Image (cartoon, rainbow, N blue to C red):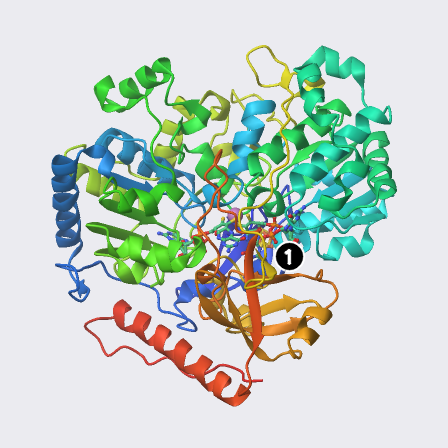
Amino acid sequence: MEKAWAVCPYCGAGCKLNLLAENGKVVGVEPLDGITNEGELCLKGYYGFDFINDTNILVPRILHPMIRRKKGAPLERVSWDEALDFTAENLVRIKKTYGPRSIMLTGSSRGPGNEANYVMQKFTRACIGNNNIDNCARTCHGPSVIGLMDTVGSGAMTLSIPQMENADCVFLFGYNPSASHPIVSRRIVKAKEKGAKIIVADPRVIETARIADLYLPIKNGCNLAMMNTFCNIAVNDGLIDRVFVDAHSNGFDEWWETIKKYTPEATQEITGIEPALAREAVRMYATAENAIIGWGMGVTQQKQGVKTVHTIAALATITNQIGRPNCGLAPVRGQNNVQGSCDMGMWPSLYPGYQKVEDPAMREKFAKAWGVPEEQLLLEPGFKLTDLPHGVKEGKIKAFYNFGEDPLQTEPDSGDMKETLENLEFFISQDIFMTQTTALADVVFPGTSWGEHDGVFTASDRTFQRFTAVVPPKEECRHDWEIFADLSTRMGYPMHYNDTKEIWDEIRSLCPNFAGATYERMEGTGYAQWPIPTEDHPGSPNLYLGGKFNKPDGRMLLVAHDHIAPTEMPDDGYPLVLCTVREVGHYSCRSMTGNCKALSSLAEEPGYVTIHPDDAEARGIEQEQLVWVYSRRGKVMSRADVTDRCNKGTVYMTYQWWIGKCNDLTMHQTDPLSGTPEDKFSACQVEGIEDQLWAERHLQELYLDLRGRLYQEAQPQEQAPVPQADLVTA
Ligand SMILES: Nc1nc2c(c(=O)[nH]1)N[C@H]1C(S)=C(S)[C@@H](COP(=O)(O)OP(=O)(O)OC[C@H]3O[C@@H](n4cnc5c(=O)[nH]c(N)nc54)[C@H](O)[C@@H]3O)O[C@H]1N2
Ligand SMILES: Nc1nc2c(c(=O)[nH]1)N[C@H]1C(S)=C(S)[C@@H](COP(=O)(O)OP(=O)(O)OC[C@H]3O[C@@H](n4cnc5c(=O)[nH]c(N)nc54)[C@H](O)[C@@H]3O)O[C@H]1N2
Ligand code: SF4
Ligand SMILES: [Mo]
């Protein structure tokens, strides 16, 4: 039995585990005593490993490079040399014809690790010559990154995951950790056991609401009005620390000019919250010795995302719940390595280590380190991931290099995204599975999977941890970083690395805040938490200790905004709010969890639409029935889950399902300050289906057809295995 230590590749909780292998196959895991998980794992940690073995449960892994010689032609298996030369020639041609800015790239916050992302952004900047590099944080905690950089200075959690259980109050606002980060959720349960007060503000009765001391059933889309109200109450009820505010922040008087209007009585109509309940919540939070405020996609996937984050930072600062251990801001980052993608400069305005591309001194530093003339590195930020659809429509983006993301499943308005990808002149996808996105590509590069390569992930709380390979790469799969380096060399900017340590040491040499995070420190269950400027520095569990913020004058900036309503309000034709969320057993585009034996048996297509009993009854819909859900963008089938834990007037779908694909319904409207899609709020209608037998059959047909096509694309020259009709019918 082989054993290798690794970090779980699902959520950002950063759980350490051993991967166990026999005869080149991964056969199990055992939990390790990592800093964030202390010997615990959730169901995905325990049962989410066997996708590596190419189980063919949902779709096959891609094992060979493939190209499509021209649009509309089938994918063809070719040698690595041919695939890389074909790609280099096309990218060089596009760069020459339309300029370097016509090429867009996106990095991966999942299996590959920091080193592969670093090499990809270096390829983007030093070889292609633009800043058009982004990652899925754009659709996720982008507003937290931006909103926190604006106010407190760094876009990250201010405390550590283990400290969460030592808080005296945990306030969750639009964050559902029991589904999203189960091992973080354990810390909250432990805090409760130690006597902490729990407050939950969420339109749904989430698991944590069931152990909460106060539950605020807020209306969907009211966040900014609600947060302004909390701040208003803190000031008017004498719950602020004026000494701390005066000593450590700027802008209070101007900020109050806006906030003073938001009394709980004035906003009750928008928030749905009784003034007395709102007052009690703020008192509980502000008077706790150490309080944490945790938020997630309920805040960020809204039109008011960045503005709400500004106000959350304000609430923590005025009540002095920041800058000490066991308290502070907890935007717990979603993907296992989305903190890392941002750390590595997969962001159109930032070099690795949060060094700004607009700063000429940074440009000089990186140009020198990478051996390119300064003019090669642009001072203007590049395109955002969510600029892709209009960038292609306007003819500004001609080529797209997709690395370890599945935009056709995970970006809003999939119909429009499909058109976007089809209208590209040249499209490369580098993944481990034949996803719906990869099936549209002109070039398919097979990367090695987690379990087959080494690297460093950054957990949600800024903790760097190493993971290692336990099995060799399958067939012709190559390490993601090797693919970028080889392609770059063929395009005239030679890059060569022997291993990930060499890449990591280059990263440390360029990023002062990461300099002390050596590979040696991160052996086994070792870790390094940034900022960690030197090799003898202990690392930083907390940011802003003593109220010293990461701003030029060391002071936090208070900024306030008036509330704005979501873009698409319900109306007669589309009377329900559609809110899209997560479920515990499946993960993002589902290519990995859907190929794990245990996890795939938990739930199947088309997933569920959660609906309040009154809304179901009004439509004659019963539990488990197949239904139609439609919006101005599309119409999909789903299965009804009728429950009063969901609020009346809103339905909830998870974005994991390919037939019950909620992103066929969502819209491409974004927070203008971050470019983050409004995935949490659009208008829809739900309708019962009379003939349930027909619906079950139709569902099977759609699913088999889609999977059949993906199998075919993955193995063009072979007898593709035929997917089985293995849906459990109701
Ligand atoms: N099992 C599993 N775990 C995951 C993932 C997965 O796909 N599957 N994805 C990972 C990723 S990428 C991320 S970013 C994290 C996200 O983790 P979370 O932030 O927990 O994500 P969501 O469940 O989308 O949304 C959080 C909550 O926001 C609430 N909400 C909706 N509208 C509003 C509103 O207007 N105001 C407020 N205050 N709340 C609202 C929803 O009811 C929901 O309970 O999870 C990570 N973990
Ligand atoms: N409607 C709706 N849509 C949403 C959300 C929502 O709440 N509602 N949430 C959004 C959020 S928060 C996020 S973060 C995004 C996530 O969106 P994505 O980043 O697109 O989703 P993932 O499933 O994480 O994509 C990971 C891809 O990387 C591949 N992969 C895994 N490991 C490796 C590797 O080592 N090498 C390579 N080359 N590929 C690899 C996987 O097979 C998969 O195709 O989805 C967003 N979409
Ligand atoms: S909590 Fe997250 S990191 Fe930990 S085992 Fe579960 S999915 Fe993996
Ligand atoms: Mo995310």
The residue nearer to you, when weighing 587 against 579, is 579
Q: In which quarter of the image is residue 459?
A: top right
Locate the C terminus by quadrant: bottom right
Are there few (<14), some (14-19), or many (20+) residues within 10 Å of tag 1?
Answer: some
Q: Which residue is drawn at 34% across and 37% down?
A: 133
Q: Does the residue labelled 1 lie within 8 Å of ligand 1?
A: yes
The residue nearer to you, when weighing 134 against 20, is 134
Q: Is residue 33 visible?
A: yes
On screen, 362 above or below 66? Answer: above
* SS at badge 1: helix
On screen, 566 above or below 606? Answer: above
On screen, 600 above or below 397? Answer: below
The residue nearer to you, when weighing 194 against 701, is 701
Q: Residue at x 67, y 61 (%)?
A: 649
Residue 661: x and y in percent read 47, 65
| Residue 159 left/right relative to 606 | right
Label 1: which residue? 179
| Residue 159 left/right relative to 590 | right
Q: Residue at x 85, y 37 (%)?
A: 279
Q: Can residue 335 be seen in this view?
A: no
Residue 73: x and y in percent read 15, 65
| Residue 187 left/right relative to 78 | right
What is the three-letter code of the residue carrying label 1? Ala
Residue 533: x and y in percent read 52, 20
Residue 5: x and y in percent read 51, 50
